[in-house]
Amino acid sequence: MSNKPLIAVWGNPGSGKTLTTIKLAKALAAKKQNVLILCCDALCPSTSTILPQAAKQQRSLGELLSLPSLTQEELLRYALPLDDSPHIALIGYKKGDTAYMYASYNRERAVDLLTLARHLADVILVDCSSYLSADPLSTIALELADTVFRLHSCELKSLMFYASYLPLLTDLRFRRSLNVSVLSNVKVGQNEKEYSQVFGGIEVTLPYVTELEQQTADARLLDDLSGKDAKTYLSGVEHLIQLALPEEHQQVAKSKDKSSKTSTSNTTTLNLLNWLKSFLPKRRGDGQ
Ligand SMILES: Nc1ncnc2c1ncn2[C@@H]1O[C@H](COP(=O)(O)OP(=O)(O)OP(=O)(O)O)[C@@H](O)[C@H]1O
Ligand SMILES: [Mg+2]
């Protein structure tokens, strides 16, 4: 199995990284892509805000990163399957976590994790921490990603954030040409044009949608969007997928249907939930 696309979602604090990651995962899952989400934020662990039913789960990205050795089996053991979205699994920090609770890890460990992940799912989405200095995994994801969605918001704090952090990414290994600039959570009346210019050009704009804010507040980000305002937002997400993924990833729905009739030997043709279940303890959420 070849390396699968790695997409990093990064941006200023509160720019919509987590929300965008989840909506990208849903759009990809609708195309029958198996998606593994890595949520790097240890400051406000997001697993139970995305998956409230996982609030009691014991598995944490912090623990996975500090295991004596990493294997595909361990990675699968830590991945939480989503009952309602069988093509999506998630690894993140659990409720109550702080980064200080786990042994620190080095660059090599972060590379190993991302490399193993790229052999497990069709697409890897990394919801990066804004604070690169505090999160090596996010930094390495920015370095190794095939595409980085760089989320900006129409706020002075976004300008200040990029003024501080972009200079840290000037090294050639960060391949900034692979970044896609996104203006996120754009509200009516905000000065979209001016901010786009200041940020050096924006490729995709994601509008503010009340329903999305409500979904976040109710921990229902995995729900579909139904309101008419969501249309422009969802076409923005599709645009991101077109920019990031080669065509074959966007048309897998048809080809997978065909291939699953002829072969089940390749794990990417199985749905991720069934696949993960074989690695999971009998009762979900009991950790061991
Ligand atoms: N397009 C949008 N429409 C409505 N609300 C949005 C949109 N994008 C983001 N938001 C809201 O902005 C807030 C921040 O979003 P989110 O948590 O995804 O950002 P983040 O970049 O992951 O934040 P953090 O830096 O804390 O991890 C949330 O309340 C979310 O609902
Ligand atoms: Mg977040």
Image (cartoon, helix red, strand yellow):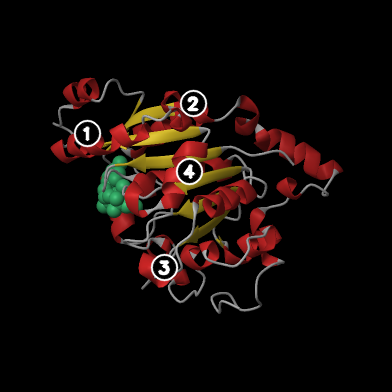
Q: From this viewpoint, is residue 36 visible?
A: yes
Q: CA distance from mark 4 to mark 1?
A: 20 Å
Which amino acid, by three-letter code, is at mark 3? Pro
Of labels 4 and 1, earlier in sequence is 4
Task: Check disc 1 and report the residue beneath it.
Answer: 163
Which amino acid, by three-letter code, is at mark 2? Leu
Task: Check disc 3 and report the residue beneath it.
Answer: 52
42 lies left or right of 280: left
**For the residues bearing labels 3 and 2, Cβ distance under 8 angstroms:** no
Task: Check disc 2 and report the residue beneath it.
Answer: 243
Q: Quadrant of the C terminus?
A: bottom right
Q: Position of residue 167 (x, y in %)?
A: 29, 32
Q: CA distance from mark 2 to mark 1?
A: 25 Å
**For the residues bearing labels 3 and 4, Cβ distance under 8 angstroms:** no
Tell me the crowding category of disc 1: few under 14, some 14 to 19, or many 20 or more residues within 10 angstroms, Cα based.
few
Q: Position of residue 238 (x, y in %)?
A: 47, 32
